[in-house]
Amino acid sequence: MRRITLRGAELEGFEVHDPASYIKLIFPEPGQLEPDRPLPDGPRAKSMRTYTPLALRPALHEVDVDFVLHGEGPASTWAAQAALGQKIFLMGPGPGYKLDQAAAALLMIGDDSALPAFETVLAALPDAVQAQLLVEVTSADEERPLAGASHVQWVVRGPDNTQAGRALEAALRARGPIPPGTRIYLACEAAAMRRLRSLLTTELAVERSRIVGRGYWKLATANHPDHDYGEDD
Ligand SMILES: Cc1cc2nc3c(=O)[nH]c(=O)nc-3n(C[C@H](O)[C@H](O)[C@H](O)COP(=O)(O)OP(=O)(O)OC[C@H]3O[C@@H](n4cnc5c(N)ncnc54)[C@H](O)[C@@H]3O)c2cc1C
């Protein structure tokens, strides 16, 4: 992953209220040095992608974004080469995760693309909520301290993205029962999210209403929608 700080006077007044909110970023098209400015009634930019505003410093007009460098794709390609002074556009924010203030425990399960979202949830959680995380990264080098978590389990996918979510499934099965009342926030590759949710509701007997599922990206699919809540099954 690569953390990039976006700074611009046009971020004056930019605020984010919910954790795990999203922003839309517009990257240059091939051959462009900077993207076209989006217009309210203009066409949707082809190279617009969805990211998490990880940290805001309003006085400095700054937003930090962590990019998974997964290879081909306007966002990942741009993030891999980004240098001081380059321009992209930022729009948003869109809605995030509604915390259940009454829940005693939250289990967040996901991959590296959701790690920034999980960090914003951790930062917003009341002290009384026990937060556990199960996170899949491509390499153990990507593991990092997560403030506010009572327990973090890292699992490693390796370089083959077709295996997305498999290490999470194995780790979840090995974990055993999930305490009743635990809320679950699940965000990762779209098919993996559906498999993990099914594992939770069948083998681990978690009520579906306790699970919030988000498909953050989809194998072999560019520009997966920002609102894949897995409601198609
Ligand atoms: C609400 C929300 C918040 C998000 N926040 C973040 C964030 O903070 N940081 C972040 O890195 N991502 C985040 N994502 C995921 C990000 O939007 C996608 O990974 C996006 O597809 C990246 O765009 P791209 O231009 O790099 O690749 P695309 O052009 O969309 O895809 C090109 C190819 O790359 C593959 N691909 C895309 N993403 C990944 C990945 N993560 N790992 C492996 N292969 C991939 C696709 O399957 C496709 O084959 C978020 C998604 C959502 C819905």
Image: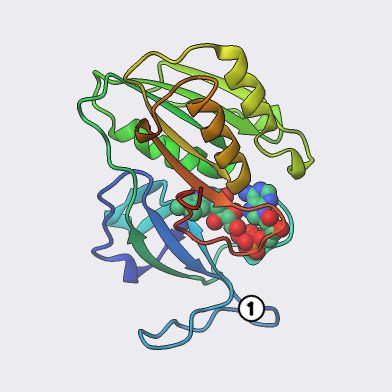
Q: Is residue 119 placed above or below 92 in the rendered structure?
A: above
The residue pinned by badge 1 equals 29
- Residue 29, placed above or below residue 178: below
Q: Position of residue 137 (x, y in %)?
A: 64, 34
The residue sitting at the bottom extreme is 42
Residue 140: image location, x then y, percent: 69, 27
Does the rendering let one see residue 69?
no
Q: Nearer the viewer, residue 85 or 188?
A: 188
Quarter of the image holding residue 79?
bottom right
Q: Where in the figure is residue 206, as x and y percent of width and height?
A: 43, 24
Q: Which residue occupies the foreground of this view, 115 or 141?
A: 115
Q: Secondary structure at mark 1?
A: loop
The amino acid type of the residue labelled 1 equals: Glu
Quarter of the view holding residue 99: top left
Q: Residues within 10 Å of mark 1 (few under 14, many from 20)?
A: some
Residue 27, percent across and down? 57, 71
Q: In the image, is 149 to the left or to the right of 154?
A: left
Quadrant containing ligand 1 reads bottom right
Name the residue rendered at 56%, 28% in the picture: 199
Can I make out residue 42 in this image? yes
Label 1 residue near ligand 1, CB within 8 Å: no
At a point 65% along the width and 64% down the height, the residue shown is 222
- Rendered image coloring scheme: rainbow
- In the image, what residue occupies the spot 74% across and 44% down? 161
Up-down relation of residue 123 to residue 206 (above or below):
below
Q: Residue furthest right?
A: 160
Left or right: where 210 falls relative to 192: left
Q: Which residue lies at the image location 21% right of the left edge and 30% below the top edge?
A: 101
Location of the N terminus (image quadrant) = top right
Against 106, residue 217 (above or below) is: below
Query: Which one is nearer the viewer's eye here, 185 or 12?
Result: 185
